[in-house]
Amino acid sequence: MDKINQFQITGMTISGFKSYEKPTELVFGNPTTITGGNGRGKTSIADAIAFAVTGLPFFGERGLDRLHNEANPDVFVQMRFLDEDGAPHELTRTRQKDRMAIQYDGYSIRQMDLSDMFGEKDVFLSIFNPLYFIEELGDEGKNLLEMYLPKVSQADVLAQLSEPVRLHLEKEDILSPEAYLKARREKIRSLEEKITYITGQRDQAAAQKQLNAERRQSLPQRYDSLQRELAGLKEKQFAGLDVDAMNEKLMECSERYSEARRDGQTDDHELREQLTALREKIAARRAEQYQSKYTHSLAEAQARVQTLSAQYNQDAAAYKALTPGVPCPICRRPITENELPKIQEELRNSAAAVLAQGQEQQAQIIELQELDQKARETFEQFQADDLAKWEADAQQLESKIQQLADDAAAQAESLRVEIQQLTADLEYGNLTQEEYDRLQACREDCRQCEAEMTAFQSVDDVDTASFDQQISNLKAEITEQKKLIADVTVYASKRAEMTFSALKMNRVEISLFDVVKSTGEWKDAFKFTYNGRRYDRLSLSEKVRAGMEVSELVKRLTGRNYPVFVDNMESIDDLENARPTGQLFLAKCVSKAELSVRPVRPIAAAMPKAA
């Protein structure tokens, strides 16, 4: 989309927007006066124009739900305008629920297309709303200004400075004076830290040099004294002691100690094997189970008893069933009444014989069970006797093994104590613990003295003059860095003057940087004054006048001459300080009056080109 550098709004159609429920046609001129009481829709016109171009209200608020009319929630805003060539255009924006749609001259477009045409929302609103830039953007306004401020080259700035400063800085790369000054100050701090460090090294070297001189004189005397003391302790240590005999005794005891430990392990080996075998024998005997030799005979007898019992029950059943005419259980012929007594007698005799045999077999079973029980008791008695005897034998073996171990340990402990005493005697001799510790300390002190005397012979004293030269060089570099800071501060001041000349306004002044008086450092700032007074202390009319000058500044920097909507004109006498260009909307509150939108001068068909 082509950039629109200048336009004037000729009219609007609004419906469903804030207080405008039904479609309302508005015609604008240049300027256009809008009057009416509170709540009549004056500011709503400003919101509608801002909404058409940016999708946001007059002050850029994000909450769009408040823009919907309660009775008609479908927002419709159509803005008609002439561009700088006098060509007419229509920009329509609708919002139904959360869905936004934009049309430009009948074609659907996106918000980013409008940003290409009218600039980003902050640019448009900073021109259209005199209070937006200062009160809504805050510090972000500085970034917006810096985007459009003309770039001033380093060569142009240097050309405005004195020759010494120019020659000093012409080879420096000063893309950002703030970053350059910060780097120089960090460099100075680093150099000062180096001076502190080297000064400490120099002082330490001087102190070491003095200490070395003193040590050179005292070390030989100390070494001789230690040698004499050491010799006296050595002489006392083994005076009157036969060291060779003590060493032989120590070797003998050590051999006996090793032999005692070895013998102790060998002597109980056989006993442990016997004990192991006996424990295995006990376990095997305990695991043995009684095996009865009467099992087969008992089973046969019990089987015969079951057979005889079955036969007896059969004969008894047949006897009860005998009546004349039934078949004989033996010959299978029908029994006559005369034969019945004889046959009954035969069955009684047969049953009695079977019963006698069964009783005989039952008595045999009882006899076998008694024999089996006696055999089990005999087995268990023999097993218990064997286990008791073998457990006693095992306890005796364990006692013998323990006694051997105790004897060997006692012998070994006696030898260990003797060895320990001999070792101490060979180490300490006749010295007490305090004297022995002193002997060790004297030896260590002698070795340290020898090492220090050797070091003094091979190392020369440190030359502190080299440290002084390094410190002198660093101070000279600090002086150079400070001179650069002073010259770059002059450079930055001139660069700011040349850069901010584009920000020149009638009564409004903007400060983008402050200089810290104590350090000379540049500090970011973004402050507005009007007639020398702070913005936050101004009246509403003064704020509007100041905002009008800022709006004209943004027009000048961006090259966009857009309409300006001035609200609260009832508190403003005039806008002569700003000398506004482009189309003006002047809204004024008239108590209890109906809304009136009146073009003071109609808009010509073709707009004049912006200067």
Image (tube, rainbow, N blue to C red):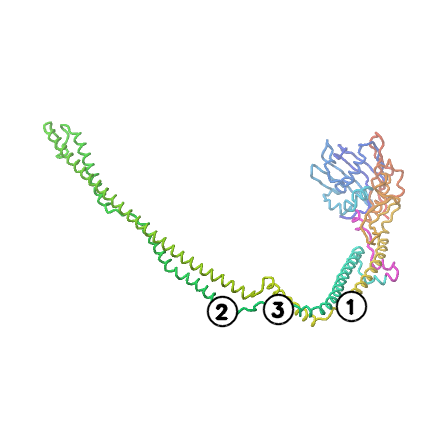
In this rendering, the label closer to the viewer, 1 or 3: 3
Does residue 82 appear anywhere in the picture?
no
Q: Amino acid at mark 1?
A: Ala
For disc 2, the marked residue is 248
For label 1, the SS is helix
Residue under the point 69% across and 38% down: 98
Against 553, residue 208 (above or below) is below
From the viewer's perspective, is the residue at label 2 or at label 1 nearer?
A: 2
Residue 163, located in which quarter of the rendered image?
bottom right
Spot occupied by residue 144 in the image (x, y as percentages of width and height): 79, 48
CA distance separating discs 3 and 2: 26 Å
Which amino acid type is marked by label 2?
A: Glu
Residue under pointer 3: 232
Q: Secondary structure at mark 3?
A: helix
The residue carrying mark 1 is 465
Mark 3 vs mark 2, foreground winner is 3
Q: Is residue 446 left or right of residue 568?
A: left
Alpha-carbon neighbours of circle 2 within 10 Å: few (<14), some, or many (≥20)? few
Where residue 300 sits: x, y (%)? 21, 43
User: Which residues make up the magenta segment?
Assistant: 141-165
